[in-house]
Amino acid sequence: MGRYVIRRLLQMIPVFIGATLLIFLMVNVMGDPIAGLCGDRECDPATAAQLRREFGLDKPVWQQYATYMGNVFTGDFGTAFNGQPVTELMGTAFPVTIRLTVIAVVFEVVIGITLGVITGLRRGRPVDTGVLLVTLVVISVPTFVTGLLLQLLLGVKWGWIAPSVSSEARVDELILPGLVLASVSLAYVTRLTRTSIAENRRSDYVRTAVAKGLPRRRVVTRHLLRNSLIPVVTFIGTDVGALMGGAIVTERIFNIHGVGYQLYQGILRQNTQTVVGFVTVLVLVFLVANLLVDLLYAVLDPRIRYA
Protein backbone atom coordinates (compact mmCIF):
# COMPACT_ATOMS: atom_id res chain seq x y z
CA MET A 1 0.00 0.00 0.00
CA GLY A 2 2.80 2.42 0.91
CA ARG A 3 4.64 1.90 -2.36
CA TYR A 4 1.41 2.32 -4.28
CA VAL A 5 0.68 5.67 -2.59
CA ILE A 6 4.22 6.90 -3.29
CA ARG A 7 3.93 5.84 -6.93
CA ARG A 8 0.61 7.61 -7.28
CA LEU A 9 1.99 10.78 -5.68
CA LEU A 10 4.88 10.76 -8.16
CA GLN A 11 2.42 10.28 -11.03
CA MET A 12 0.48 13.31 -9.84
CA ILE A 13 3.47 15.61 -10.43
CA PRO A 14 3.50 15.54 -14.27
CA VAL A 15 -0.31 15.58 -14.31
CA PHE A 16 -0.33 18.69 -12.11
CA ILE A 17 2.31 20.43 -14.22
CA GLY A 18 0.56 19.55 -17.48
CA ALA A 19 -2.87 20.66 -16.25
CA THR A 20 -1.61 23.96 -14.84
CA LEU A 21 0.42 24.65 -17.99
CA LEU A 22 -2.65 24.09 -20.16
CA ILE A 23 -4.75 26.35 -17.93
CA PHE A 24 -2.05 29.02 -17.89
CA LEU A 25 -1.83 29.03 -21.68
CA MET A 26 -5.61 29.11 -22.12
CA VAL A 27 -6.05 31.99 -19.68
CA ASN A 28 -3.27 34.02 -21.27
CA VAL A 29 -4.89 33.85 -24.71
CA MET A 30 -8.29 35.07 -23.41
CA GLY A 31 -7.33 38.63 -24.19
CA ASP A 32 -5.26 41.51 -22.95
CA PRO A 33 -5.83 41.83 -19.17
CA ILE A 34 -4.24 45.28 -19.13
CA ALA A 35 -6.84 46.52 -21.62
CA GLY A 36 -9.53 45.24 -19.27
CA LEU A 37 -8.15 47.39 -16.45
CA CYS A 38 -8.74 50.58 -18.43
CA GLY A 39 -12.42 49.90 -19.01
CA ASP A 40 -14.01 51.17 -22.21
CA ARG A 41 -11.23 53.63 -22.92
CA GLU A 42 -7.95 52.60 -24.52
CA CYS A 43 -5.00 52.49 -22.13
CA ASP A 44 -2.24 55.02 -22.42
CA PRO A 45 0.75 53.20 -24.00
CA ALA A 46 3.13 54.29 -21.24
CA THR A 47 0.71 53.26 -18.50
CA ALA A 48 0.02 49.92 -20.19
CA ALA A 49 3.75 49.21 -20.53
CA GLN A 50 4.33 50.04 -16.85
CA LEU A 51 1.48 47.76 -15.74
CA ARG A 52 2.84 44.91 -17.88
CA ARG A 53 6.23 45.28 -16.24
CA GLU A 54 4.68 45.35 -12.76
CA PHE A 55 2.70 42.16 -13.34
CA GLY A 56 5.43 40.45 -15.38
CA LEU A 57 3.29 40.32 -18.51
CA ASP A 58 6.10 41.72 -20.67
CA LYS A 59 8.04 38.45 -20.39
CA PRO A 60 7.60 35.38 -22.62
CA VAL A 61 4.75 33.06 -21.63
CA TRP A 62 7.09 30.20 -20.70
CA GLN A 63 9.02 32.49 -18.37
CA GLN A 64 5.78 33.75 -16.80
CA TYR A 65 4.71 30.14 -16.19
CA ALA A 66 8.09 29.17 -14.70
CA THR A 67 7.97 32.18 -12.37
CA TYR A 68 4.39 31.43 -11.39
CA MET A 69 5.07 27.76 -10.58
CA GLY A 70 8.13 28.71 -8.57
CA ASN A 71 6.01 31.08 -6.51
CA VAL A 72 3.22 28.49 -6.11
CA PHE A 73 5.54 26.05 -4.36
CA THR A 74 6.30 28.80 -1.84
CA GLY A 75 2.61 29.49 -1.25
CA ASP A 76 2.44 32.64 -3.38
CA PHE A 77 -0.36 32.55 -5.97
CA GLY A 78 0.26 36.06 -7.18
CA THR A 79 -1.58 39.34 -6.79
CA ALA A 80 -4.90 40.32 -8.33
CA PHE A 81 -5.06 43.46 -10.45
CA ASN A 82 -6.73 45.31 -7.57
CA GLY A 83 -3.59 44.77 -5.47
CA GLN A 84 -5.11 42.08 -3.22
CA PRO A 85 -3.13 38.83 -2.85
CA VAL A 86 -4.89 35.85 -4.42
CA THR A 87 -4.32 33.87 -1.21
CA GLU A 88 -6.55 36.35 0.64
CA LEU A 89 -9.31 35.78 -1.90
CA MET A 90 -8.86 32.04 -1.45
CA GLY A 91 -9.02 32.41 2.32
CA THR A 92 -12.49 33.94 2.09
CA ALA A 93 -13.86 31.92 -0.86
CA PHE A 94 -12.73 28.34 -0.27
CA PRO A 95 -14.18 27.88 3.25
CA VAL A 96 -17.62 28.90 1.95
CA THR A 97 -17.44 26.61 -1.09
CA ILE A 98 -16.07 23.73 0.98
CA ARG A 99 -19.07 23.96 3.32
CA LEU A 100 -21.39 24.12 0.34
CA THR A 101 -19.69 21.12 -1.30
CA VAL A 102 -19.79 19.04 1.89
CA ILE A 103 -23.53 19.65 2.20
CA ALA A 104 -24.01 18.70 -1.46
CA VAL A 105 -22.00 15.49 -1.05
CA VAL A 106 -24.00 14.56 2.07
CA PHE A 107 -27.20 14.91 0.04
CA GLU A 108 -25.71 12.73 -2.70
CA VAL A 109 -24.60 10.02 -0.28
CA VAL A 110 -27.63 9.93 2.01
CA ILE A 111 -30.49 10.54 -0.42
CA GLY A 112 -28.91 9.22 -3.63
CA ILE A 113 -27.61 5.92 -2.27
CA THR A 114 -30.74 5.31 -0.18
CA LEU A 115 -33.05 5.81 -3.16
CA GLY A 116 -30.71 3.74 -5.33
CA VAL A 117 -30.79 0.80 -2.92
CA ILE A 118 -34.58 0.96 -2.55
CA THR A 119 -35.19 1.07 -6.30
CA GLY A 120 -32.52 -1.54 -7.02
CA LEU A 121 -34.15 -4.01 -4.64
CA ARG A 122 -37.61 -3.21 -6.04
CA ARG A 123 -36.77 -3.02 -9.71
CA GLY A 124 -39.82 -2.81 -11.95
CA ARG A 125 -42.21 -1.85 -9.17
CA PRO A 126 -44.11 1.47 -8.95
CA VAL A 127 -41.58 3.03 -6.54
CA ASP A 128 -38.79 2.22 -9.00
CA THR A 129 -40.66 3.76 -11.91
CA GLY A 130 -41.54 6.86 -9.90
CA VAL A 131 -37.98 7.50 -8.75
CA LEU A 132 -36.63 6.97 -12.28
CA LEU A 133 -39.08 9.54 -13.65
CA VAL A 134 -38.20 12.08 -10.97
CA THR A 135 -34.45 11.65 -11.50
CA LEU A 136 -34.92 12.00 -15.26
CA VAL A 137 -36.75 15.28 -14.74
CA VAL A 138 -34.05 16.56 -12.38
CA ILE A 139 -31.32 15.68 -14.88
CA SER A 140 -33.23 17.33 -17.74
CA VAL A 141 -33.94 20.63 -15.98
CA PRO A 142 -30.96 23.06 -15.92
CA THR A 143 -29.54 23.92 -12.52
CA PHE A 144 -30.33 27.62 -12.80
CA VAL A 145 -34.01 26.80 -13.39
CA THR A 146 -34.12 24.50 -10.34
CA GLY A 147 -32.33 27.06 -8.20
CA LEU A 148 -34.50 30.01 -9.23
CA LEU A 149 -37.69 27.98 -8.84
CA LEU A 150 -36.84 26.79 -5.32
CA GLN A 151 -35.66 30.26 -4.39
CA LEU A 152 -38.93 31.76 -5.62
CA LEU A 153 -41.18 29.21 -3.92
CA LEU A 154 -39.36 28.60 -0.64
CA GLY A 155 -37.81 32.03 -0.22
CA VAL A 156 -40.07 34.65 -1.78
CA LYS A 157 -43.59 33.18 -1.79
CA TRP A 158 -43.63 30.86 1.22
CA GLY A 159 -40.90 32.58 3.25
CA TRP A 160 -39.42 29.33 4.61
CA ILE A 161 -35.84 30.45 3.93
CA ALA A 162 -33.97 33.63 3.16
CA PRO A 163 -33.91 34.34 -0.61
CA SER A 164 -30.13 34.88 -0.45
CA VAL A 165 -27.25 33.81 1.76
CA SER A 166 -25.68 36.27 4.19
CA SER A 167 -22.00 37.17 4.11
CA GLU A 168 -21.28 34.67 6.93
CA ALA A 169 -22.70 31.79 4.82
CA ARG A 170 -23.80 29.72 7.80
CA VAL A 171 -24.41 26.00 7.39
CA ASP A 172 -28.19 26.34 7.86
CA GLU A 173 -28.26 28.97 5.09
CA LEU A 174 -26.38 26.66 2.71
CA ILE A 175 -28.78 23.71 2.96
CA LEU A 176 -30.99 24.81 0.06
CA PRO A 177 -28.07 25.92 -2.17
CA GLY A 178 -26.36 22.61 -1.35
CA LEU A 179 -29.46 20.71 -2.46
CA VAL A 180 -29.61 22.71 -5.69
CA LEU A 181 -25.90 22.15 -6.33
CA ALA A 182 -26.25 18.41 -5.69
CA SER A 183 -29.53 17.91 -7.55
CA VAL A 184 -28.15 16.63 -10.86
CA SER A 185 -25.36 14.58 -9.25
CA LEU A 186 -27.84 13.18 -6.74
CA ALA A 187 -30.01 11.92 -9.60
CA TYR A 188 -27.00 10.27 -11.24
CA VAL A 189 -25.95 8.64 -7.96
CA THR A 190 -29.48 7.26 -7.53
CA ARG A 191 -29.57 5.76 -11.00
CA LEU A 192 -26.01 4.44 -10.77
CA THR A 193 -26.64 2.80 -7.39
CA ARG A 194 -29.90 1.29 -8.64
CA THR A 195 -28.22 -0.23 -11.69
CA SER A 196 -25.30 -1.60 -9.68
CA ILE A 197 -27.57 -3.09 -6.99
CA ALA A 198 -29.85 -4.71 -9.56
CA GLU A 199 -26.88 -6.19 -11.42
CA ASN A 200 -25.01 -7.54 -8.38
CA ARG A 201 -28.21 -8.92 -6.91
CA ARG A 202 -28.04 -11.74 -9.44
CA SER A 203 -24.41 -12.60 -8.61
CA ASP A 204 -23.42 -16.01 -7.27
CA TYR A 205 -22.04 -14.69 -3.98
CA VAL A 206 -25.38 -13.04 -3.17
CA ARG A 207 -27.28 -16.21 -3.99
CA THR A 208 -24.88 -18.18 -1.81
CA ALA A 209 -25.38 -15.79 1.12
CA VAL A 210 -29.16 -16.08 0.76
CA ALA A 211 -28.94 -19.87 0.52
CA LYS A 212 -26.96 -19.98 3.77
CA GLY A 213 -29.90 -18.36 5.51
CA LEU A 214 -28.22 -15.04 6.34
CA PRO A 215 -30.57 -12.22 7.36
CA ARG A 216 -31.69 -10.01 4.49
CA ARG A 217 -30.21 -6.87 6.07
CA ARG A 218 -26.79 -8.51 6.38
CA VAL A 219 -26.90 -9.79 2.82
CA VAL A 220 -27.68 -6.28 1.55
CA THR A 221 -25.23 -4.31 3.72
CA ARG A 222 -22.28 -6.71 4.01
CA HIS A 223 -22.33 -8.37 0.59
CA LEU A 224 -24.49 -6.59 -1.95
CA LEU A 225 -24.02 -2.93 -1.02
CA ARG A 226 -20.25 -2.93 -0.55
CA ASN A 227 -19.48 -4.27 -4.02
CA SER A 228 -22.19 -2.14 -5.59
CA LEU A 229 -20.74 1.08 -4.17
CA ILE A 230 -17.45 0.90 -6.10
CA PRO A 231 -18.73 2.76 -9.21
CA VAL A 232 -20.73 5.12 -6.97
CA VAL A 233 -17.63 6.03 -4.96
CA THR A 234 -15.77 6.66 -8.21
CA PHE A 235 -18.46 9.07 -9.38
CA ILE A 236 -18.72 10.92 -6.05
CA GLY A 237 -14.93 11.22 -5.74
CA THR A 238 -14.56 12.83 -9.14
CA ASP A 239 -17.67 14.92 -8.50
CA VAL A 240 -16.14 16.69 -5.48
CA GLY A 241 -13.87 18.84 -7.62
CA ALA A 242 -16.63 19.39 -10.17
CA LEU A 243 -18.96 20.64 -7.44
CA MET A 244 -16.37 23.10 -6.11
CA GLY A 245 -15.46 24.47 -9.51
CA GLY A 246 -18.92 24.22 -11.03
CA ALA A 247 -20.82 26.09 -8.34
CA ILE A 248 -20.78 29.33 -10.33
CA VAL A 249 -24.49 29.20 -11.20
CA THR A 250 -25.61 28.19 -7.71
CA GLU A 251 -23.45 30.81 -6.03
CA ARG A 252 -24.72 33.51 -8.35
CA ILE A 253 -28.36 32.59 -7.68
CA PHE A 254 -28.00 32.64 -3.88
CA ASN A 255 -25.42 35.47 -3.75
CA ILE A 256 -22.69 33.27 -2.27
CA HIS A 257 -19.17 34.71 -2.50
CA GLY A 258 -17.31 31.46 -2.94
CA VAL A 259 -14.94 29.93 -5.47
CA GLY A 260 -17.48 30.11 -8.30
CA TYR A 261 -18.09 33.81 -7.64
CA GLN A 262 -14.36 34.61 -7.64
CA LEU A 263 -13.80 32.62 -10.84
CA TYR A 264 -16.69 34.43 -12.50
CA GLN A 265 -15.32 37.82 -11.47
CA GLY A 266 -11.82 36.85 -12.56
CA ILE A 267 -12.98 35.74 -16.01
CA LEU A 268 -15.23 38.79 -16.39
CA ARG A 269 -12.39 41.18 -15.55
CA GLN A 270 -9.71 39.09 -17.32
CA ASN A 271 -7.86 38.78 -14.01
CA THR A 272 -5.46 36.01 -15.01
CA GLN A 273 -3.76 35.68 -11.62
CA THR A 274 -7.06 35.02 -9.85
CA VAL A 275 -8.33 32.51 -12.42
CA VAL A 276 -5.07 30.55 -12.65
CA GLY A 277 -4.61 30.54 -8.86
CA PHE A 278 -8.08 29.20 -8.10
CA VAL A 279 -7.98 26.61 -10.89
CA THR A 280 -4.56 25.43 -9.70
CA VAL A 281 -6.02 24.61 -6.29
CA LEU A 282 -8.99 22.87 -7.94
CA VAL A 283 -6.58 20.70 -9.93
CA LEU A 284 -5.00 19.62 -6.63
CA VAL A 285 -8.46 18.85 -5.25
CA PHE A 286 -9.20 16.61 -8.24
CA LEU A 287 -5.89 14.74 -7.88
CA VAL A 288 -6.27 14.15 -4.14
CA ALA A 289 -9.91 13.08 -4.54
CA ASN A 290 -8.96 10.51 -7.19
CA LEU A 291 -6.21 9.13 -4.94
CA LEU A 292 -8.64 8.76 -2.03
CA VAL A 293 -11.14 7.01 -4.29
CA ASP A 294 -8.53 4.47 -5.35
CA LEU A 295 -7.67 3.78 -1.71
CA LEU A 296 -11.34 3.35 -0.83
CA TYR A 297 -11.63 0.52 -3.34
CA ALA A 298 -9.63 -1.75 -1.05
CA VAL A 299 -11.91 -0.86 1.86
CA LEU A 300 -15.07 -1.73 -0.07
CA ASP A 301 -13.68 -4.86 -1.74
CA PRO A 302 -11.05 -6.82 0.26
CA ARG A 303 -10.07 -8.70 -2.90
CA ILE A 304 -8.40 -5.54 -4.23
CA ARG A 305 -4.74 -5.37 -3.31
CA TYR A 306 -2.23 -2.64 -4.13
CA ALA A 307 1.39 -3.56 -4.71
Image (cartoon, grey):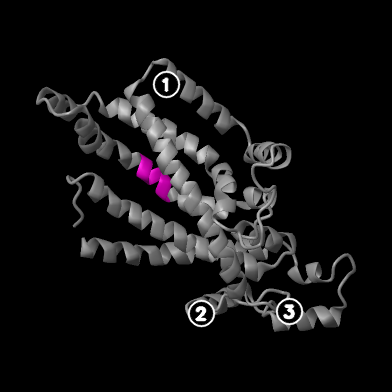
Q: Magenta span covers which residues? A: 232-237
Which residue is labeled 2 in the image? 70
Does 213 appear in magenta?
Answer: no
**Left or right placement of residue 141 versus residue 2 in this view:** right
Q: Is residue 99 left or right of residue 220?
A: right
**Residue type for callout 3:** Arg
Q: Which residue is mark 1?
A: 128
Q: Give the x, y percent position of residue 167.
A: 66, 62
Q: Residues within 10 Å of mark 3 (few under 14, many from 20)?
A: some
Report x, y in % for residue 269.
74, 64
Secondary structure type for disc 3: helix
Q: Amino acid at mark 2?
A: Gly
Residue 55 pos. (x, y %): 69, 79
Q: Which residue is mark 3?
A: 52
Which residue is at a point 32% across and 39% down the rendered structure image?
A: 229
Q: Which sits in the foreground, 91 or 232?
A: 91
Q: CA distance from mark 3 to mark 2?
A: 19 Å
Residue at figure coordinates x 58%, y 78% from the top left: 63
- Quadrant for the C terminus, please: bottom left
